[in-house]
Image (spheres, rainbow, N blue to C red):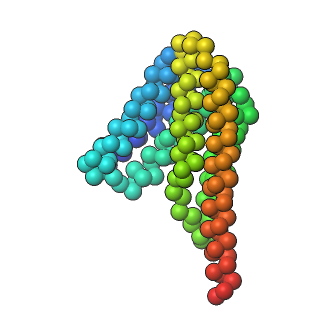
């Protein structure tokens, strides 16, 4: 168990904490925990690369921790009415559909190598910026309605674009296996 993996596990432990803080209206504390989680993500990545502490476990655990945090924050912000339900459903559905596609490809014996796409990286950044903006706005009453609306739209567009891009990659991958299988 490397130090970056321990930091990542710490971030996983922060997920229910920030979720609970959001649901109970402790917005300043939720914002602080979110910032700590973000810093921990940067620190574990830096340490893993700088000291060559990258592990297979970390390669899986880090993106799972990030997704858990973002999905839980989006759900909590949606449940509390701080994000529109349609946006939360869009974000969560994208992740669920991608997981279903990956699991299905494994079950069919044709595992899909899932590498982050450029549009997905843009989507992740947009989701993080939206979550941070909404948390800061709600915690410190910054009156950021205009920027939040623009970020909602950006997250919606990049979420749908990312889903389409991943599904295209998955369909191409699965079609190539089907074509190769019918030629043998």
Q: Point out residue 143 in the picture as x, y percentages from the top left corner.
A: 61, 13
Residue 6 visible in the displayed image: no
Front one among 45 and 157:
157
The answer to whether 145 is drawn above or below residue 71 in the figure is above
Q: Point out residue 20 in the picture as x, y percentages from the top left corner.
A: 55, 25
Q: Residue furthest bottom?
A: 184
Q: Point out residue 54 in the picture as x, y percentages from the top left corner.
A: 33, 52
Q: Residue furthest right?
A: 86
The answer to whether 97 is drawn above or below residue 171 in the figure is above
Q: Please identify the quadrant where the C terminus is shown.
A: bottom right
Q: Is residue 142 left or right of residue 84?
A: left
The answer to whether 5 is drawn above or below residue 11 in the figure is below
Q: Residue at x 25, y 48 (%)?
A: 51
Which quadrant of the view contains residue 151?
A: top right
Q: Residue at x 44, y 27 (%)?
A: 35
Q: Residue at x 65, y 19 (%)?
A: 145
Q: Residue at x 42, y 52 (%)?
A: 59
Q: How many marks?
A: 0
Q: Is residue 75 left or right of residue 3?
A: right
């Amino acid at each position: 168990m490397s130090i970056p993996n321990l930091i990542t596990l710490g971030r996983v432990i922060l997920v229910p904490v920030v979720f609970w803080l959001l649901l109970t209206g402790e917005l300043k504390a939720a914002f602080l925990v979110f910032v700590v989680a973000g810093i921990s993500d940067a620190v574990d990545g830096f340490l893993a690369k700088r000291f060559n502490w990258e592990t297979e476990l970390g390669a899986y655990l880090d993106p799972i921790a990030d997704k858990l945090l973002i999905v839980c924050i989006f759900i909590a912000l949606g449940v509390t009415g701080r994000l529109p339900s349609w946006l939360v459903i869009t974000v969560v559905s994208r992740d669920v559909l991608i997981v279903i596609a990956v699991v299905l490809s494994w079950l069919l014996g044709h595992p899909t190598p899932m590498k982050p796409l450029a549009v997905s990286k843009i989507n992740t950044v947009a989701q993080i910026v939206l979550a941070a903006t909404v948390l800061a706005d709600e915690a410190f009453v910054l009156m950021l309605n205009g920027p939040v609306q623009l970020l909602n739209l950006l997250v919606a567009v990049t979420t749908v674009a990312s889903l389409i891009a991943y599904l295209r990659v998955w369909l191409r991958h699965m079609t190539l296996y089907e074509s190769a299988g019918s030629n043998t």
